[in-house]
């Protein structure tokens, strides 16, 4: 189940990272305050090209296949094979194609008059599953992404919601009403509305912060919520009204608002980032000039609803802090020309970069 969730999240982000052309210059560092001259986006032609990325854990190695200055594909030793890339006549990335668990996935990018990526569409197994709209700031750097997902895809993800919320919340729920979502069968939830937004804050030529806000409006009924969970979802001063609410409104659909807000902060070294300008995979690193040293994520989730009893209303819900999201740190060894050679994370896992001669 977690693998399917990862695939769907990766698919959602496949078209996200609008990236600056690699200028093949040393990184200026996160505190330089300088702004690069942008030659448009979607071109990835680094001076030093990756040949292979190897991992110390069970992640399959990546073999990068180049056709001249174009990255043609990334091959992995898995059933799904790899990822293929197609380009415009200007060598800008046009489509990203992959097959995941038997489903064909294709992401298509669109560009505006300034050659900046303005949107992306993702087709999964013949379904136009996702679309993204990108906005840039005055320095032509990515500042905002708005994502729209097909309702069929969201309904599919609802089947994974208990697992997702359980992973995010861990032991932090306590008496939180979010326990309902971690235990609720998908048949008890239906989608009414959704919103997904991401904002990017820059420090010089590096992304210093990413702010993600997601909102789902789900429909359920009081009769579908176990009594013991209702006791935790209703504020103490209203709990005497639960029996009345269930008797009057037990089978009436109730819109329940689920919101998740997440802020992720990044710090960097002052060395050259070999992934800058490459967004054929899901990585915030593609946006920044330098290499990520620390990642610190934090956020909260909220579930809320209001039950209209005619003569009064009964609220449900409260905020719940999320577990640390994506927090990690990285140590680097570098090649003679300043690119990462071995990256070690806080758990001791290593990623090794081999470059073409």
Image (cartoon, helix red, strand yellow):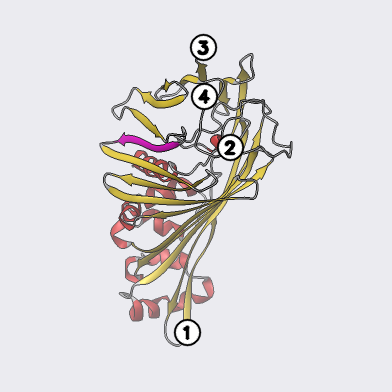
Q: Which numbered disc, 4 or 2, marks the residue that appears first in the sequence? A: 2
Q: Which numbered disc, 3 or 1, marks the residue that appears first in the sequence? A: 1
Q: CA distance from mark 1 to mark 2?
A: 60 Å
Q: 192 and 119: which one is in front?
A: 119
Crowdedness near tag 2: few (<14), some (14–19) or many (≥20) residues, C-alpha within 10 Å: some
Decide: marks 4, 1 in contact (CB < 8 A)? Answer: no
Residue 204 x/y as whole percent: 69, 40
Q: CA distance from mark 2 to mark 3?
A: 27 Å
Residue 251 x/y as whole percent: 30, 74
Q: Which label is found at residue 219?
A: none
Q: Is residue 86 rendered to the left or right of residue 43?
A: left
Q: Residue at the location (47% across, 64% down)? A: 232
Which residue, given by chain and number where applicable, does mark 1 sit on?
Answer: 312
Which residue, given by chain and number where applicable, does mark 2 sit on?
Answer: 39
Is residue 33 part of the magenta span, yes or no?
no
Residue 356 x/y as whole percent: 50, 15
Q: Is residue 181 rendered to the left or right of residue 188?
A: right
**Circle nearer the viewer, 3 or 1:** 3
Is residue 98 part of the magenta span, yes or no?
yes
Q: CA distance from mark 4 to mark 2?
A: 36 Å
Q: Which label is found at residue 357?
A: 3
Q: Which label is found at residue 349?
A: 4
Residue 203 x/y as whole percent: 68, 42
């Amino acid at each position: 189940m977690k693998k399917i969730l990862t695939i769907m999240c990766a698919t959602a982000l496949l078209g996200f990272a609008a990236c600056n052309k690699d200028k093949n210059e040393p990184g200026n560092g996160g505190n330089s305050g300088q702004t690069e001259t942008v030659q448009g986006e979607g071109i990835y032609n680094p001076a030093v090209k990756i040949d292979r990325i190897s991992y110390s854990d069970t992640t399959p190695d990546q073999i990068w296949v180049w056709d001249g200055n174009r990255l043609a594909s990334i091959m992995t030793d898995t059933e799904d094979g790899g990822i293929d890339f197609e380009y415009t006549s200007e060598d800008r990335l046009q489509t990203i194609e992959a097959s995941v668990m038997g489903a064909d996935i294709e992401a298509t990018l669109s560009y505006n008059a300034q050659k900046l990526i303005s949107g992306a569409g993702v087709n999964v197994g013949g379904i136009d599953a996702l679309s993204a709209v990108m906005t840039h700031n005055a320095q032509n750097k990515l500042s905002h992404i708005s994502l729209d997902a097909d309702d069929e895809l969201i309904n599919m993800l609802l089947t994974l919601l208990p697992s997702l919320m359980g992973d995010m919340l861990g032991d932090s729920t306590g008496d939180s009403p979010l326990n309902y979502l971690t235990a609720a069968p998908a048949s008890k939830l239906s989608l009414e509305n959704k919103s997904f937004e991401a904002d990017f804050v820059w420090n010089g030529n590096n992304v210093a912060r990413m702010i993600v806000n997601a909102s789902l409006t789900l429909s359920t009924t009081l009769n579908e919520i176990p009594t013991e969970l209702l006791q935790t979802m209703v504020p103490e001063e209203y709990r005497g009204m639960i029996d009345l609410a269930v008797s009057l409104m037990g089978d009436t659909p109730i819109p329940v608002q689920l919101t998740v807000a997440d802020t992720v902060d990044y710090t960097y070294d002052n060395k050259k980032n070999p992934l800058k300008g490459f967004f054929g995979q899901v990585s915030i690193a593609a946006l920044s000039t330098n290499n990520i040293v620390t990642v610190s994520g934090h956020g909260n989730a909220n579930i809320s609803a209001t039950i209209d009893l005619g003569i009064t209303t009964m609220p449900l819900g409260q905020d719940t802090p999320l577990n640390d999201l994506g927090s990690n740190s990285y140590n680097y060894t570098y090649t003679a020309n300043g690119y990462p050679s071995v990256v070690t994370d806080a758990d001791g896992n290593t990623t090794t970069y081999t470059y073409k001669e």
